[in-house]
Image (cartoon, helix red, strand yellow):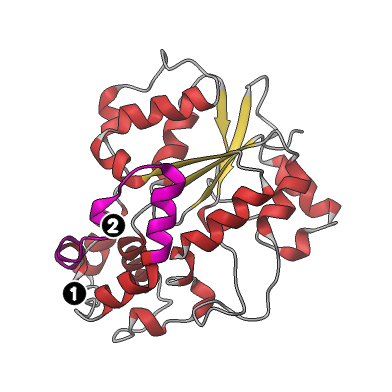
Amino acid sequence: MRLPNLVIAGAQKSGTTWLHTMLDMHPHIKMSRPKELGFFNRPYNIDDRLALDHYMSHFSDAGEHRYVGESTPHYFWVKSPECPFSPKGSDHDIAKFMRETLGPLAKIIILLRDPVTRAVSAFHHHFAMGRIDCGSSILSCDHSLGIVDMGFYKRHLRHWSDVFRGELQVYVYDDIKSKPTDLLRSVLQSLELSDAELPPRELIDRRVNARTAILRRFREAGSEFPGIRSSDVPALLDLYLPSIEYVESYLQRDLPTWKDIDYLMAGNCGSMKAV
């Protein structure tokens, strides 16, 4: 059995399912089924040989693939006792646990989505799963869900970059929307794999859209998603501005829509938006 040498570690609601699916189609990559194994975010798995053996069993059919991997988007989360949106009582270091287990040569991929829309998308997802009551505010949900806290990319990215000594591959969801083939080529190049064996274009463009299935389920039940209050979007943007600026500096690129309040209001206010 093998340990993975490729992990898509986050962020939640940022296109990880799409990238997992695309990479699994490459002849030299074998991604796990199911997708989200959630091994490293559980502190009780440390020094548990049976848990590690079970984790490795998901890669037992990897054969001679150059890369075997998994994708668990809530790995990319560093909790902080100083942050009012962070759950209390956990100092488990996911990044450190991963590096100590997989070694320094494992490839770690991070996908980031504008944090306001990511939070709204996560809010709707958890509502659909029955974890949030109708009428709840996005800013007052159970902190253990990480709906707001997972968007503080500055905290998460600084720590993960320190642990992996800058050897992270960081991409943005915007490029999945606008130029998915180019993004997939870039990921394969970072893995030193040929991009001559890309999936068919129609599959690349068929981006995973959880919103369609979730909306259908709620419409059949005669229900709809809770709306996002108009005051929530500017409040979230104020919280996330330092993280947005940090990501821009880290990637050396401007991300104007991440800071455009009119764009964010139009995309996220009202019911059934931005899933």
Mark 1 neighbour density, 10 Å: few (under 14) some (14–19) many (20 or more): few
User: How far across and down, in percent of the image, does residue 233 sit?
Assistant: 26, 73
Q: Which residue is mark 1?
A: 222
Task: Find the magenta span and give its range.
Answer: 242-266
| Residue 248 falls inside the magenta stretch | yes
Q: Going 63% across and 22% down the picture, which residue do you hit?
A: 66
Quarter in which the N terminus is drawn: top right
Residue found at x 27% / y 33%: 179
Q: Is residue 112 visible?
A: no
Contact, mark 2 vs mark 1 (Cβ under 8 Å): no
Q: Where is residue 43, by image quadrant?
A: bottom right
Residue 244 at x, y percent in the picture: 38, 58
Nearer to the camera, 160 or 23: 160
Say which element carries label 2: helix
Callout in the foreground (2, 1) = 2
Q: Residues within 10 Å of mark 2 (few under 14, many from 20)?
A: many
Q: Main secondary structure of the magenta part?
A: helix
**Can you say whether 243 is above or below 49 in the image?**
below
* Of 226 and 61, the residue lying toward us: 226
Residue 258: x and y in percent read: 28, 57
Which amino acid, mark 2? Trp
- Say how many tags the image has: 2
Instruction: Give residue 232's quadrant in the image.
Output: bottom left
Q: Amino acid at mark 1?
A: Gly
| 93 vs 206, nearest the viewer | 93
Q: Residue placed at 31% from the left, 54% from the top?
A: 210
Task: Using the rendered view, name the quadrant where residue 90 is placed.
Answer: bottom right
Whole-percent x, y for residue 196 in the image: 41, 12
Asked whether residue 19 is in view, the answer is yes
Q: Which residue is mark 2?
A: 258
Q: Could you tell me which secondary element the residue under label 1 belongs to?
A: loop
